[in-house]
Amino acid sequence: MGIYLPIAEISVNIFVLLAMGAAVGFLSGMFGVGGGFLITPLLIFYNIPPAIAVATGANQVIASSFSGALSHVKRGTLDFKLGGVLLAGGIVGSTGGIFVFGFLRRLGQLDLFISLLYVVLLGTVGGLMLVESVNALRATRSGAAPVLKKSGQHNWIHRLPLKMRFRASKLFVSVIPVLGLGAGIGFLSSIMGVGGGFIMVPALIYLLKVPTNVVIGTSLFQIIFTSAYTTLVHATTNQTVDVMLAFLLMAGGVAGAQYGAKAGQRLRGEQLRALLALLVLAVAFRLAIDLFVTPPSLYSLSGADPT
Amino acid sequence: MAGFRAFLAVASLSLFAAASPASAQTPATENIQIGLSTDHVSITAGFSGADLTIFGSLENADPRVARQGRYDIVVVLEGPARKVVVRRKDRVLGIWINLESETFKNVPVSYSVATTRPLQDVTDPNSYKQLSLGAANIYMQPADDDESPATIQEFTAALRERKTATGLYSVNVGGVQFLSQNLFRATVRLAPNVPVGTHKARAFLFKSGLFIKESSAQLEIRKSGFEQSIFRVAHDYSFLYGVFAVSLAMLTGWLGRLVFRKD
């Protein structure tokens, strides 16, 4: 069944979008990530213009992270104060990202930049995750106890000034890296249409040493607001948010996420991470191919500056 | 595209031929008229291209010439003119990157032609050039005049090629048919991504390869329906639209949790 997307201005198959949403939702529920980093490339593969895929991806991320954050609020595994500081940074980063987005779009380099960012980030994160999880799998097979958290060990980040206490996370840390992390994620959110959970979660755990149980809830909390802000700004400055597209993805996504979460409980952590790493690498690889393969036409047309 | 149902029946006949005030002595010059029964066409969401039919009449036609088939008609539906940027990708370190670009002012977004016979059989290239008729003869003005003619030519050619590839520029040979000696019907193609705005329909009459007369009419193409309202709101009330998009996402997330909750 075809449906016409009002903003993307193309006809697409409604079931393909629902299935896409459900599949990504399932995976995001299973791995505890927002799924924006999968949705945006999938939409691009499905011929949605990258600018619209990004802005709509950000919109879709709100639904899945809101749904996820609700359960964390209920369980009390959400550090509002930490989330708030991350968010303050996020707003700044996102605003900067929107400007860069509009600038690149006028230059005609937006599509390339989005693809490059995806390839580099997904390639790095996927590669690191794969190495880490394979090592962990090996360690458990050989029977050695995994050394995951070295508590009490501090790095350079903990020597920075302007310290602040985050009670829920049992953390006393400088606000500079927290704001910086938030800003970085906000920037990526507006350019890539991702929530940024796949970077936020490891960064909170490994860099800031936030206890694992509050990491996901806090990350989701900040992602809701950063992507809400990103959606708003994209909608006002670039008019690239397609609610119809977003809604179909969300509808499939929230359903898929709940089943994914259940499936995820049956798999072990390392296996789960190795699978996610492979998936992330596959998306990066697919996007990389498009950069190198000779395009069918070397020329492209675009209307001049979006007014 | 021929298979698509032409659900926009637009135009209609205008028969002026019978009442022509031609005097008996001097052989009156031929005249051409096209008529549209409506000044606007609404296309709905899910529009996947269609054929637009325009009817017209030929006045004071010389029966002898008509019998020999020496009257030719070219009908053009030209979309609104916009600024277009053409970009060329080049390989840098193995990666294809948009490098060179050229901006053109006033390029018709769409240009559909229907003719009685192949364009080269109707008249000679020079007359087409004089009339700036045909996709190859529209003048595309580059925004930057300092560019070398070779570059301009390359990008102009690429622009036409891309427009043709996306179906926005098309030629329908045999798309104009005489229904009788005085009445003809032209079928021009509307691409699925036909632009909204004021389109100009023009009909050119040729007699034995000579240009005789031109007639034109205007047609507004609008999009209608629910999807179009969304588009309009997204552009006119973009902030409220954004708020709506965010609220919808939150509502969906919340409802999804209620409905599918597994914890």
Image (cartoon, coloured by chain):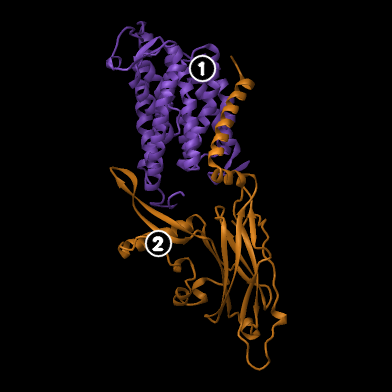
SS type, badge 2: helix
Q: Nearer the viewer, residue B172 or A111?
A: A111
The location of residue A52, given as percent across then percent down, is: 49, 40
SS type, badge 1: helix
Q: Residue at x 40, y 61 (%)?
A: B157
Q: Residue furthest front?
A: A162
User: Which hue is chain A drawn in?
Assistant: purple
Q: Dots 1 and 2: beta carbons under 8 Å? A: no
As shown in the figure, which amino acid type bears the numbered disc 2? Answer: Ala
Q: Nearer the viewer, residue B63 or B35?
A: B35
Q: Which residue is mark 2?
A: B157
Q: Is residue B195 above or below residue B136?
A: above
Chain at tag 1: A
The location of residue A145, given as percent across then percent down, is: 36, 5
Q: Is residue A172 above or below residue B90?
A: above
Chain at tag 2: B
The location of residue A12, given as percent across then percent down, is: 57, 42
Q: Residue at x 48, y 17 (%)?
A: A217
Left or right of A187, for residue A233: right
The location of residue A20, given as percent across then percent down, is: 54, 32
**Within-10-Å neighbours for mark 2: few <14, some 14–19, many 20+:** few
- Distance from the alpha carbon under mark 1 to that under mark 2: 55 Å
Q: Which chain is orange?
A: B
Q: Is residue A109 above or below residue A223?
A: below
Q: Which residue is mark 1?
A: A264
Whether residue A26 is visible to the viewer of this picture, yes or no, is no
